[in-house]
Structures are given as structure tokens and as C-alpha cells.
Amino acid sequence: MITRRQLLIGALGLGAGALTACAPRPAEELSTTVFCFDTVCQLRGAMGQEVLDGAVTLCERFEQLFSRTIATSDIARINDAGGEPVVVEPETSDLISKALGYCEESGGLFDITIGAVSSLWDFRNGIVPSEEDVAAALPHVGWRTVHVDGATVRLDDPAAALDLGGIAKGWIADALISYLVGEGVESACVNLGGNVAVLGSKPDGTPWRVGVQDPFAERGASIIARTDIADGSLVTSGLYERAFEQGGRRYWHILDPRTGYPVETDIVSASVLSERSIDGDGFTKQLFFNDPESGLADLAARGLHGLIVRADGTMLSTPGAPFTLL
């Protein structure tokens, strides 16, 4: 069975959290690379050009719907509505509904209304918000203020803001696989940076090989573990994905909804092996908020496998996890 991110296309395809090794392509295997969701994405598999083009069109559509920084997106319209109901596309309501389930399961440690705080941080330019601004925004973080009723989404708190960056790629990867299945494709690999989802085996019949980025090496330089997948997903989240140093302190992109600041943890990388990519997104972030043993035990109880890398280089996994450590 079976997060910034680069790809090496050819014998190896690398996302900052995942690396995919593929056999030489048969003539019918096609591949394309696009920039969406603030990362480099690779789509490949045994399919016709029209089907591949359709997958790219879907990626572009999803970005236009889910990005909070595109003024016309469904998410931006919800955030700008001042608490009024907003009619959205079916994909948006489905993603938000599913995301709320992970918010509830995590006890709010994963919270899609973190946008009120995340919009204050600028990890690209290394900007830390003032303590006053964080304190003012924090009361507006609370996933229970989000309500989905069919195609209508409403925020109880007019100052709340959605940020689906922590889960959208998992949903999108699953949606792309579903589209390919509907088009009769039997072998494909969708690599959205740290989210890798595969359909079937490689065209030559062997499993897809997916690797975990070494969090201590230069991005894209090496992997620390790998696993073989046929029909499934590997999602990796790492503190190295978006981070900067200022005043002798290192800041990373996974924010604690209880404090508004980067989560305090000695976990530097977390991976989840699952059938659905959205489960990987929904549960990897939670691992950074728990002690490793408890987090992995929770994964195992859900029938999922996980791999954690700690700051001292220690690697821990769920019992029987099919990872090869390198």
C-alpha cells in the first residue's frame, strides 16, 4: 500500500516531502509539470494527452476556487463576506465539510480558521507579526464558527478567515485520482509537492516508489526513507518547508491555533501513509502537536501508518510500517 517542494523529473521525481522513482517510460506514458498551489506539481501516467490536459485544467480550477489570496476565489469571498452566507461551488463546500471533520477529530489543533493569524505571517519575506496583532487575531480562530449548508458557507465571526492550505492539496490529489479513474486510467502518479497519490502500479506493473525528504539535507538533495505504493498516498509535512530565522530564533509555517505562533516541537518531519491523500493532510499536521509515541499510536488505531523524524535524527514509525530507512 501504501510540504518547499521541488521535483526532479526523470529517474526520480522529488517533492520537498516526497520523492517518486519511476521506471523508464513506456511510449503511452505521458507527464507534465505545472506550478499550482504554491508548489511544483507533476502529473504522469499511462493516459492520452486530452486526459492529461483535463487534469491540468482541474488543477487550475481548484487553485482559483481554494486560494485565499485570489480575490475572486470562493475562500476569499467567504473571508470578505463579513459573516454573510456565500454560495460556493460544490467542490468548495465538499472540501470545507471534510476539513471540519479533521478539525473536530484533532480537538481544534488543526483549524481551518487559522487564516485570521496566518495572514499576519510572511514566511517568504521573513516577517514576524507584532505580539499585539497576534493577540488581536487569536480570538477569531475557531473552526466551530464555520457552517456549511449545501452550497452555502457562512462564518459566524465576521473577522474569522479560512485558510485551507493545510488540507487542500490532499483533497485535490484525491479529486485528480478520481477524475483519472473516471477517464479509464489505470496507472498514474500525482505529485503535488509533499502530497503524492498514485493510481494502480507503474505502467510496467511494479509499485510506485515514493521517498521522504531528508529534513537535514539541502532541499531535493536526498531522501531519508522510502516506501512502495500501489493505489494510495504518502503525505509528508516538514518544518523545513517554509521557515526563516530572525533574532536568533527559527520560525516555521505550522502555526499553533492556541498561541498564533509556530508550534513548539522537536519533530521536524512527519509522514502519513494512507489510502486517501486527504487523510494524510488531515493527520500529519496533528503529529506536530503530540508526543511522537502518542501521535503514532493514534495513527495506528485509525489503520494508518506514519513516520516521524525528530530534531536529533531519531526516526519512529507505526508498528509494521512499510518504510525502508536509508
Image (cartoon, grey):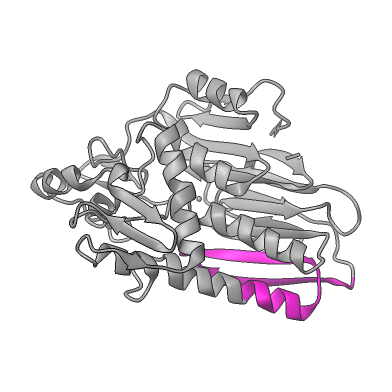
Looking at the image, residue 101 sits to the left or right of residue 170; the answer is left
Q: Which is nearer the eye, 172 or 82?
A: 82
**At which x and y percent is residue 314?**
54, 24
In the drawing, does residue 320 fall left or right of residue 83?
Answer: right
On the image, the x and y values in percent for residue 44 come to: 73, 66
| Residue 159: in magenta span | no
Q: Residue at x 30, y 40 (%)?
A: 262
Q: Nearer the viewer, residue 246 or 91?
A: 91
Q: Residue at x 43, y 50 (%)?
A: 166
> Total number of numbered labels?
0
> In this picture, is 224 found above or below 71?
above
Does residue 28 belong to the magenta stretch? yes
Q: Residue at x 55, y 54 (%)?
A: 171
Q: Quadrant of the C terminus?
A: top right
Please state the horizontal and vertical placement of residue 167, each as a whole percent of the image: 47, 50
Residue located farthest toward the front when viewing the structure as drawn: 150
View extreme (bottom): residue:
50
Range covered by the magenta-colored residues: 27-56
